[in-house]
């Protein structure tokens, strides 16, 4: 038994050295002008602080006090604050009474995450190219896999977290909780245990404290198998992301995905596409169901993060409409008298009988109910029907203009002219649109 204990201690010692070496490599690979460390006071984040302190990198500590655990919340904050004072480390604390948010309804962990990440983002906005460092570890990855799978999550959810994702760095992902605790003990890192981690009232705690230990007891190599599977899933997710990235314009603007392209995307690629567009996942099915609706149907995205405001169905596919388009100005026009009619006509110039014009000419956007008598037709026709017959994309129809006099519409600009005003001989009035 003693020989087993000695061997186990030796393995832990080796893992402690490995943590320091691996951490140094990650920091060298992911250099930043400043690092903000999310430190709760627990073992993992206090180890993260110790590792940074030994590397002598420019960093600050961010601590969120949700004020949910009374004295324990206060003591957590005091530990982190005092450690920072001891080592002259900049310390920033957010006091947020989460109980007020919970009284309005919602999931505790989700609300806490929103508060936490909004706090992080406020520092990222002030320090360009800085990184937020998080103390997630290998056990967190395994828990995420089982939770995602139990909820029917996609490949990316089951693939787990990446070491670097945007402005977030997780340098401890390859190490277990036991290895981090071994590091803390050997390096005399002080930490506090969160008693709520033992309460099996949250989904994560049930997996952490009951289900995963029982699974591993039955299948000792299960954790290694999960880690291997997650690596494979991560490779697939990366490939899917690269593929869908090519479908999106580099600079946000209106763009369309053809039905042929959409038919070739599997479910994970579709989710990756929406993620890159910052479209809420809850709208994924609604957007796909547009294919069953009429042309002109749309889904409004209602996302503050996405540069796109809606998705439209047309005959060719799905069109993603850019949210920040500049309002198109009314086309200007120049009037002149021509002594001869041209042999070839263009949509930029129209030739009118001045005797058929009543009063001043002006341009305005078309509206519901507008009619005119297009050349070659008997009677009048709705502008809306003219645009539909011309297969003008629905999202573009609002930017169509009409030229009118004081009695009637003379022209649907760039589409057709009212036959009642067309010049049949010279001299005539030429309207040139600019």
Image (cartoon, rainbow, N blue to C red):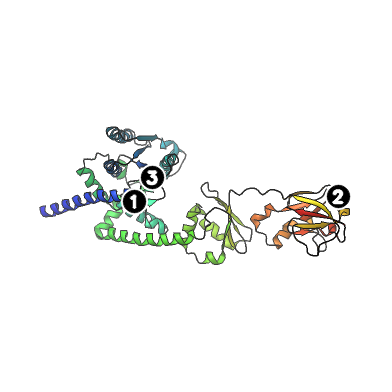
Tag 3 residue: 131
Q: Position of residue 304 (x, y in %)?
A: 52, 46
Viewer-closest of 81 and 69: 81
In the image, residue 181 above or below residue 214: above
Viewer-closest of 36 and 97: 36
Mark before the other along the chain sequence, 2 or 1: 1
Mark before the other along the chain sequence, 1 or 3: 1
Point out the frontmost of discs 1 and 3. 1
Q: Which mark is residue 29?
A: 1
Q: Position of residue 22 (x, y in %)?
A: 27, 51
Query: Where does the N terminus fall, quadrant-wise?
Result: bottom left
Residue farthest along the right direction in this orientation? 355
**CA distance for labels 1 and 3:** 12 Å
In the image, residue 371 above or below residue 61: below
- What is the secondary structure assignment of the residue under circle 1? helix
Give me the residue at 86% from left, 50% from top.
Answer: 358
Give me the residue at 55% from left, 48% from top.
Answer: 302
Q: Position of residue 374 (x, y in %)?
A: 79, 60
Work out whether residue 17 can be spotted: yes
Does residue 402 appear to the left or right of 64 in the view shown? Answer: right
Work out whether residue 370 can be spotted: no
Q: Position of residue 146 (x, y in %)?
A: 35, 56
Q: Which mark is residue 358?
A: 2
């Amino acid at each position: 038994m003693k020989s087993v204990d000695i061997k186990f201690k030796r393995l832990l010692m080796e893992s402690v050295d490995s943590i320091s070496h691996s951490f140094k490599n990650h920091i060298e690979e992911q250099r930043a002008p400043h690092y903000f460390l999310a430190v709760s006071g627990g073992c993992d984040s206090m180890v993260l602080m110790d590792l940074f302190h030994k590397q002598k990198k420019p960093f600050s500590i961010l601590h969120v006090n949700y004020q949910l655990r009374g004295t324990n919340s206060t003591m957590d904050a005091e530990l982190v604050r005092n450690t920072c004072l001891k080592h002259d480390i900049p310390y920033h604390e957010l006091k947020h009474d989460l109980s007020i948010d919970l009284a309005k309804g919602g999931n505790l962990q989700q609300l806490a995450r929103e508060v936490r990440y909004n706090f992080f983002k406020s520092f990222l906005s002030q320090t360009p190219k800085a990184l937020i460092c998080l103390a997630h570890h290998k056990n967190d990855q395994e828990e995420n896999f089982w939770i995602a799978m139990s909820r029917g999550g996609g490949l990316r959810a089951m693939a787990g977290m990446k070491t670097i994702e945007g402005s977030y760095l997780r340098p401890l992902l390859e190490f277990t909780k036991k290895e981090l605790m071994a590091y803390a003990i050997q390096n005399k890192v002080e930490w506090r245990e969160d008693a709520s981690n033992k309460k099996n009232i949250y989904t994560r705690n049930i997996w952490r404290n009951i289900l995963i230990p029982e699974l591993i007891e039955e299948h000792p190599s299960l954790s290694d198998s999960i880690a291997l599977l997650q690596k494979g899933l991560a490779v697939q997710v990366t490939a899917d992301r690269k593929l869908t990235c090519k479908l999106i314009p580099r600079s946000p603007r209106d763009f369309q995905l053809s039905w042929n392209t959409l038919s070739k995307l599997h479910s994970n690629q579709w989710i990756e596409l929406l993620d890159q567009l910052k479209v809420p996942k809850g709208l994924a099915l609604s957007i796909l169901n547009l294919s069953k609706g009429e042309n002109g149907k749309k889904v409004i995205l209602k996302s503050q993060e996405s540069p796109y405001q809606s998705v439209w169905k047309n005959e060719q596919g799905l069109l993603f409409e850019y949210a920040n388009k500049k309002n198109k100005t009314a086309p200007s026009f120049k009037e002149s008298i021509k002594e001869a009619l041209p042999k070839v006509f263009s949509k930029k110039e129209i030739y009118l009988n001045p005797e058929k014009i009543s009063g001043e000419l002006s341009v305005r956007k078309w509206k519901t109910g507008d009619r005119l008598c297009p050349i070659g037709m008997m009677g009048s026709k709705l502008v809306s029907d003219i645009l539909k017959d011309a297969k003008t994309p629905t999202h573009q129809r609002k930017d169509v203009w009409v030229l009118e006099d004081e009695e009637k519409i003379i022209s649907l600009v760039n589409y057709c002219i009212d036959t009642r005003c067309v010049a049949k001989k010279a001299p005539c009035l030429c309207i040139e649109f600019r």
